[in-house]
Amino acid sequence: MNETPVCDAAGTAARLPFSALMREIARAAGDLAAGSLCAPARQAVPFPGGAVMLSMPATAADVGIHKLVNVAPDNRALGLPTINGVVSVYDGVTGRLRLLLDGPTVTTRRTAAVSMLAVQRLLPGGPRHAAVFGTGTQAAGHVLALLTLHPDVRVDVIGHAPGRAEAFAETFDDGRVRPAGQVDPAADLVLTATTSAVPVYEQPSREGRLVIGVGAYRHDLAEIGARTLAGSHLFVDDPEGARHEAGDYLQADVDWSRVRSLSSLLDEGPPAGPAVFKSVGCAAWDLAAARCALHADDASERNPA
């Protein structure tokens, strides 16, 4: 009997190259809109100490997944990862377990890939100068995606505490990544990856500047201000989840009839004018990552070293 492959963080990342993952997410978005992919709302079960267990299943004809992760914010003070968990990947016909992936790595890679899809559609010339708020795991994943997919991009990193942005930039050892105190007027992409309860970016909307928010994932969190949202075309990755979790939009009391989905953006193309893309996450994107990982695994079996 063949043993089920178990991938650590590095092994999981190796199976999820950004370009391939973006293609699978676009495919999953279409499947979700067509009803051929089932991804119910995630279930959150609190731990007594303040952590939360998140259960996110999804199924399609070819594959099923279950992402089970624990989010423990207090781990940061202990020097431990705040997210721990696993993505189980199953055959869509037999239900046989095929692969185990590192949960935090899947989350980081697929979230960045969703953002890069939005960049691809809403900033078709590609970003030349990005400003990233945040110095955590999601910020790192997005900076890595930007550097990988856009070789000529400059990335300014903005941290909330003294020295944080400098230390973060040094981890990349890349002259394209620099610490900054504020958004440069030349920035054509602003990306927020924080857990702030109040907006960290609220400049008026601007033609030629795309704003993407990935950090605020609860109704009581908001990274992007109402002034930015008011003058922008609005998008979300998952409309159902966003109505409960997109704190930026909820606190600004946006008109949800103005909000378009990722699948709509992919099918119909971008509008003219400034845009904001909000990502709250969805198990469909984890299923897309599973497809990507299985393709990589199958390819390695066909072409052994």
Image (cartoon, rainbow, N blue to C red):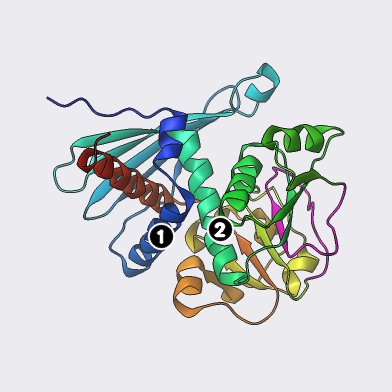
Q: Which residue appears farthest toward the front when viewing the image?
A: 305
Residue 54 visible in the picture: no
Residue at horizontal 36 percent and vertical 62 percent from the top: 27
* Magenta-colored stretch includes residue 253: no
Using residue 196 as the reference point, say whether residue 85 is left or right of it: left
- Rounded to the nearest angstrom, the CA distance separating label 1 from label 2 is 11 Å
Using residue 190 as the reference point, say whether residue 240 is left or right of it: left
Location of residue 272 (image quadrant): bottom right
Q: Amino acid at mark 2?
A: Met
Q: Which disc number belongs to residue 104?
A: none
168 versus 119 height, above or below: above
Quarter holding the C terminus?
A: top left
Looking at the image, do the residues carrying marks 1 and 2 touch, with CB atoms under 8 Å apart?
no
Q: Which residue position is annotated with label 1?
A: 23
Q: Which disc number belongs to residue 116?
A: 2
* Residue 282 on image: x %, y %: 46, 52
Magenta stretch, residue numbers: 181-205
Q: Amino acid at mark 1?
A: Arg
Q: Which residue appears farthest toward the bottom when viewing the image?
A: 272
Q: Indicate the secondary structure of the residue bearing disc 1.
A: helix
User: Which secondary structure class fits the magenta region best?
Assistant: loop
Q: Nearer the viewer, residue 226 or 28?
A: 28
Residue at horizontal 31 percent and vertical 58 percent from the top: 37
* Residue 251 on image: x %, y %: 71, 58
Q: Indicate the secondary structure of the residue bearing disc 2.
A: helix
Using residue 86 as the reference point, say whether residue 183 is left or right of it: right
* Residue 121 on image: x %, y %: 55, 70
* Magenta-colored stretch includes residue 188: yes
Badge 2 density bin: few <14, some 14–19, many ≥20, Cα 10 Å: many
Mark closer to the chain start, 1 or 2: 1
87 versus 146 height, above or below: above
